[in-house]
Image (cartoon, rainbow, N blue to C red):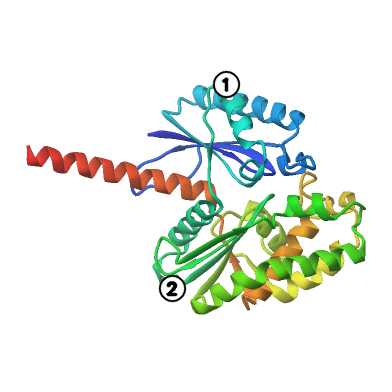
Amino acid sequence: MRLGVLDVGSNTIHLVAVDAYSGGRPTPMSDWKQPLRLVELLDKKGNIEDKGVDKLVDAVQEASDLAANLKCEELLAFATSAVRSATNSDEVLKRVEKKTGVKLNILSGEEEAQLTFLAARRWHGWSAGRITNFDIGGGSLEISTGTEEMPDLAVSLDLGAGRLTHEWFDTDPPERKKINMLRDYIDAELAGPAEQFKALGEAGLAVGTSKTFRSLARLTGAAPSSAGPFVQRTLTAPGLRQLIAFISRMTAADRAELEGINADRSHQIVAGALVAEAAMRALNVDKLEICPWALREGVILKRIDQGALEAHTKADKGDDN
């Protein structure tokens, strides 16, 4: 089955097409994305501004047309934090469906964390033991932990790199005072969830997923993406602290010149780094292993599992007849 997965994130809209089958890897045969920055297009009332909705409609239409051209038999279309938290989310969803025919499903923060955890578990395997996974998007931070394929605990906090940049920083580079205030805010938001995670025990493996973690790892010396997905990449707390001291004094334009950051995300990498450092510190994690799979792969894996279960159930019914 050729499956299209359309991910409307807080930073980008991303379409992947996969020839999905039971036991197969969710490796895209086509990969398209476009920056949207929806989380930065929220007005003071929390509504996605008209220009943001127009950009979203145009991008969804382009992705839908591409999926049709690629002969995708099914399109799984979903939206995450920016649309989920928008005051006018229902209106936005109706407008998108009316204009494009694509029905976007809103993933809850918990569902987002669970699906990302599934991807991390499948990538690292059962030998990893308890996995604690961290994922920083444009609009939210997801943390999950567990010993099975479904986490024991999964939380989502509005601590995304784009959201915090939009809400806290109004100069380039950000003022030291604002950075310190944001640090205190992030620590306060993490305090309660951190106690819940600590109560479940130490992780056998701490994992970082998402573009933010891949960029931070690259900036601290990890192998470039050109080295392929099977090269081990890590991010350490000491390396991250040194990186924050360096990049927080740079302008977004200067950060965009660093290898591992693209221009679309250079303005928000400081906030992303602050969230990563605070989350690792709150859970007493000194090192993360970077996982190349994340939410989209989790969605694909879940759909493959559902297909296999449906086929098995149908076969059982046939045997009964």
Q: Residue at x 66, y 68 (%)?
A: 190
Q: Residue furthest top?
A: 99
Could one spot residue 117 in this view of the protein? yes
Where does the N terminus fall, quadrant-wise?
top left
Secondary structure beneath disc 1?
helix
* Residue 285, placed above or below residue 176: below
Q: In the rendered view, does 96 fall on the left or right side of 218?
A: left
Where does the C terminus fall, quadrant-wise?
top left
Name the residue type under label 2.
Gly
Q: Which mark is residue 129?
A: 2
Secondary structure beneath disc 2?
loop
Q: Nearer the viewer, residue 59 or 113?
A: 113
Q: State the CA–CA distance, disc 2 to disc 1.
A: 46 Å
Q: Nearer the viewer, residue 117 or 109?
A: 109
Mark 2 neighbour density, 10 Å: few (under 14) some (14–19) many (20 or more): some
Name the residue that disc number 1 marks.
Answer: 98
Name the residue type under label 1.
Lys
In the image, which is nearer the foreground, mark 2 or mark 1? 1
* Image x and y of residue 154, in percent: 52, 62
The quadrant holding residue 152 is bottom left
* Residue 156, placed above or below residue 37: below
Q: In the rendered view, does 201 fall on the left or right side of 57?
A: left
Q: Residue at x 91, y 66 (%)?
A: 177
Q: In the rendered view, does 212 fall on the left or right side of 229?
A: right
Tell me which label, 2 or 1, sits earlier in the chain.
1
